[in-house]
Image (spheres, rainbow, N blue to C red):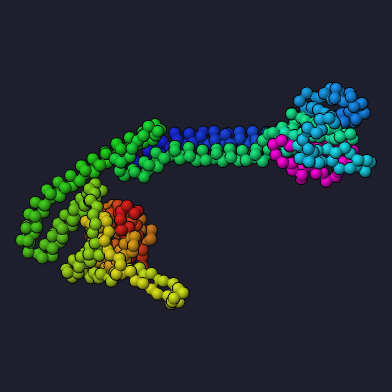
Amino acid sequence: MFVRLFEKYLPTKIRPRILLFGFLCGFLAASFASVGVGAIINRRAEIAETTWIGPVIARVYEDISRMPLERRLLSVENFNRSDAVQFALIKQDELNEAQSLEDYSLLNTNSQYGPNPRIYLELLDRNPRQRILKSDYPPEDLTAKLTFLVSAIARHDSRAKLFIIFSNGERLVVSSPKYWKARITEIQWLLICLAGMAFSGVFYAIGTRALLRPFKILSESSDDLDDVRVTALWSEEAKGIAHSLSAEQKEKAEVLDERTRMLTAISHDLRTPATRLRLRAEYIEDESLRNKILSDLDLMLGMTRDAIDFLKGGLEREDEEYFEIVSLVQSICDDFSDVGMPVTFMPIQYPTLRTTGTVFSSHEKSVPLDGMLKGNMKGRPKALQRAITNLVANAVKYGFQAKVSLTIEPGRVLIEVMDKGPGIPEDEMENVLKPFYRLEKSRNRETGGSGLGLSIVNSVIQAHNGHFDLINLPVQGLNATVDIPRSIEMG
């Protein structure tokens, strides 16, 4: 029922929401990428556009150079091109108050056709990058030189000024608020794109986990929903599943409780006629017939008792307590041995620590932990006693003998019950753990049994967060292995 509820809601309700949420997160990541790529493309287009400023600056410099000194200051502002390129002139009488050129970067080189004017650069937001400003093929005239420089300066993404020095020492100051300005660099845009895409991925992972978290809680707590707290943040589907699971769990408990009461009543009512039949069977003179009738009565009552034990095992939970597993296993073996059953309790196995050599001693040593480890553990001793008793009884009944070994480790307990029987076919290993399932070949049907022994063992071990395995031995026999933690909370 739990599986059908999850299959009903997850494909039809939650998965489309996850897909939609993933689409939105993908759209967000694509938006970050497109904005970043678009900004980088626009930046490069703007830098390429600055090449027209170089010839303008060269022409303005040449025009002002031919003007009389008294007209230069009045004419320089006439060459301004809005905010694309602006010119200013520092006259000789203002040079003493102007900043020293030593604080600026010298950019020009001499041409083979004659010396170019000295050109200095001032970056207001960052230091000049000589790798960008230095051309591998030095231009041969001022126009080509300035055309290269205006683009190189724009690539700095910083406010800048050019100082072109006349022969008399006056300075032509060139600025471009439109192109030489502070802006986000390509590396910064790339980092923004990566951060945005990473944020989208993390946001998708967190959001998806938040959507699925209620279902994870329900799947982990499907056996006991009393401790599950349904919060307002849960989706309507999750609340519906929680309500349905709780209702189904209560209904299942009521059905099992009703069946248990019915079987208990039948078992109780059967005792009286069974007792009368047993007494009447004593008067049967034929010993063979009398024994068969008594055997059938014991089988009938045993099957009823096993069914009740199996159902109670699913409903009634024994309280956890601390107990000594060695005494429990040994007492079970002693009970079988006392009535002549071929049951052997093997010596207890403890782990061994191997020490390495040190500067004081190069010898390796093995330190047994038998004096340090005890068999104390926390669990449900009555349930474990029933499970181990079933294993030993099956080994004696179907395998002719039982050798029980116990291994104590710091965090777990390993119990093995080996017999000399025919074993179990590999394709039947899972089936023998099902309730009321009995083998017809390797386990003789005529020997009786209700098919609940291994089912009870498996349910008890799972309740202790352990593992139960059945392994055929290489030559002959079966090894039933129980591996449980020494505390149920450790599972």
Instruction: Please state the extent of the stretch shown in magenta in the rendering.
Output: 123-152
Q: Which residue: 18% across, 66% down?
A: 335
Location of residue 97 by image quarter: top right
Question: Residue 452: x, y in percent?
Answer: 26, 55
The residue depicted at 36 percent of the width and 72 percent of the height is 367
Percent position of residue 68, x then y: 92, 26
Toward the left, the furthest residue is 283
Image side of residue 452 versus residue 52, left or right:
left
Count of numbered tags: 0
Residue ranking furthest to the right: 113
Q: Nearer the viewer, residue 143 or 266?
A: 143
Q: Is residue 219 visible?
A: yes
**Horizontal side of residue 130 vs 331, given as left or right:** right
Q: Nearer the viewer, residue 175 or 449?
A: 175
Q: Is residue 49 visible?
A: no
Instruction: Locate residue 121, reporting x and y percent.
Output: 78, 37
Image-quadrant location for residue 107: top right
Is 285 drawn above or below residue 300 in the view shown? Answer: below
The image shows residue 403 at horizontal and vertical percentages of: 28, 69
Please name the residue shown 82% across and 44% down the image: 135
Residue 76 among magenta residues: no
- Image check: 12 left or right of 395? right
- Identify which residue is drawn at 40% across, 33% down: 233
Work out whether residue 79 or residue 117 is closer to the camera in this orientation and state it: 117
Placement of 379 over or under 71, stated as above or below: below
Q: Give the quadrant of the N terminus.
A: top left
- State yes or no: residue 131 in magenta: yes
Q: Please determine whether, in this image, residue 444 is positioned above or below residue 164.
A: below
- Quarter of the rendering containing residue 105: top right
